[in-house]
Amino acid sequence: MNKIIDGKQFAQELNTNLKISINQLEGKRKPKLVILQVGDNPASNKYIKNKLNACAKVGIIGELKKFEEEISQKKLENEIIKIIDDNEVDGIIVQLPLPKHIEEQLIIDLIPAGKDADGFNPQTLGNVMLNNSKIFPATPYGILKLLEWKKIDLIGANVVIVGRSNIVGKPLANMLINKSATVTICNTKTKNLKDICKEADILISAAGVANLITKEFVNNNMTIIDVGANFVDGKYCGDVDFDNVLEEVKHITPVPGGVGPMTIACLLQNTFTLYKEKENL
Ligand code: NAP
């Protein structure tokens, strides 16, 4: 049995189907996603390039609005309001991190739920919690889709999430609870992390710490989803000591090629959902 969950392959399948749906929008305008960037962070430049390429491949108009690093909070907010008011813009995402002088949450809160392609707006997150949303934060959305694609049973599953961020751990926990999983969320203060992880049917690591999850944290029936995106000696890797853990578990996502491509695919799914809502399709 192939243990590796190929997120790249599934993301390509989702993107192909999305491209077909967008091609069928004969005579209608195309969906449009705007990416907001402040400054010139090299990692952000790379992520943005990937997102714009993905937009182009499926037929979504992707546009980068780049502001200088020194822009004031007020000026940035005014510029964003202009973009929000543009009727042809369906989705807006804010490329994080923002410079230190900008209040990140205020900027995120500014993006209305109807254009919130990232799924980070408090209203969107509230609806996710209430199991009443069509938009989901892209990374948790991608993880759920991967688990469903691999037919990994969530009902009653013991899921352990390492990480409680607003963009991964917390919304993911809510989405899994809504699927009737039993969820434990861990953080840096958690006692006996290894013992808690070892009991999981599904272990999702979103800590951002390379080699945090070693073979002592896993069991033979476990599915591991590695969300981590770390650079060690110039090499991109996740949170899991992949080479040593692979033999010990049932399923595992690789880094690269696991959660990353699914995050982008789900961002595009969100954009298309927002477009359809706007166009009453
Ligand atoms: P974050 O905001 O830094 O949150 C990390 C979380 O992990 C925090 O809750 C932290 O606990 C917890 N944590 C860190 N070290 C830990 C440890 N040793 N034991 C237990 N808990 C620990 O990060 P994030 O934005 O959620 O992202 C997490 C990772 O996923 C990063 O590597 C990020 O680059 C990656 N990521 C990848 C994608 C993708 O598409 N591939 C998307 C999003 C994020 P405290 O709250 O106690 O500090």
Image (cartoon, rainbow, N blue to C red):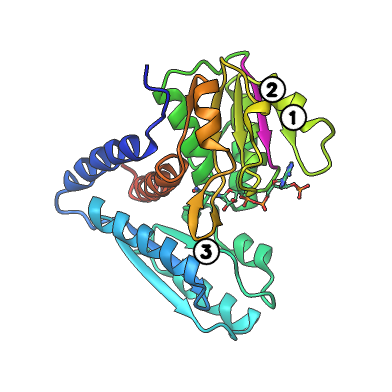
User: Looking at the picture, which amino acid does disc 3 mark?
Assistant: Val
Q: How far from the left and from the top, in percent, is residue 18? A: 27, 42
Q: Which of marks 3 and 1 is in front?
A: 1
The residue depicted at 33 percent of the width and 49 percent of the height is: 279
Magenta span: helix, strand or loop, mainly?
strand
Q: In this view, does 243 lie to the left or right of 24?
A: right
Check residue 198 in the rendering and tell me which mark sits there, or answer none. Answer: 2
Decide whether residue 44 is among the magenta residues. Answer: no
The stretch of residues the image draws in magenta is: 157-163
Q: From this viewpoint, is residue 77 visible?
A: yes
**Circles 2, 3 touching at the beta carbon (< 8 Å):** no
* Residue neighbourhood size for the residue with mark 2, other residues' Cα within 10 Å, grouped as few (<14), some (14–19), many (≥20): some
Where disc 2 sits, the SS reads helix
The circle on residue 29 is none
Picture coordinates of residue 161 (x, y %)?
A: 66, 33
Residue at numbered disc 3: 94
| Image quadrant in which you'd find residue 14 | top left
Q: Position of residue 238 (x, y in %)?
A: 54, 45
Q: What element carries label 1?
A: helix
Residue 158 painted magenta: yes
Which residue type does callout 2 highlight? Lys
Question: What x and y, as percent, mark residue 50?
Answer: 36, 59
- Residue for badge 1: 194
Q: As drawn, is 102 to the left or to the right of 251? A: right
Residue drawn at 24 percent across, 53 percent down: 57
Give the distance between the C-alpha atoms of the residues marked 2 and 3, in whole angstroms: 36 Å
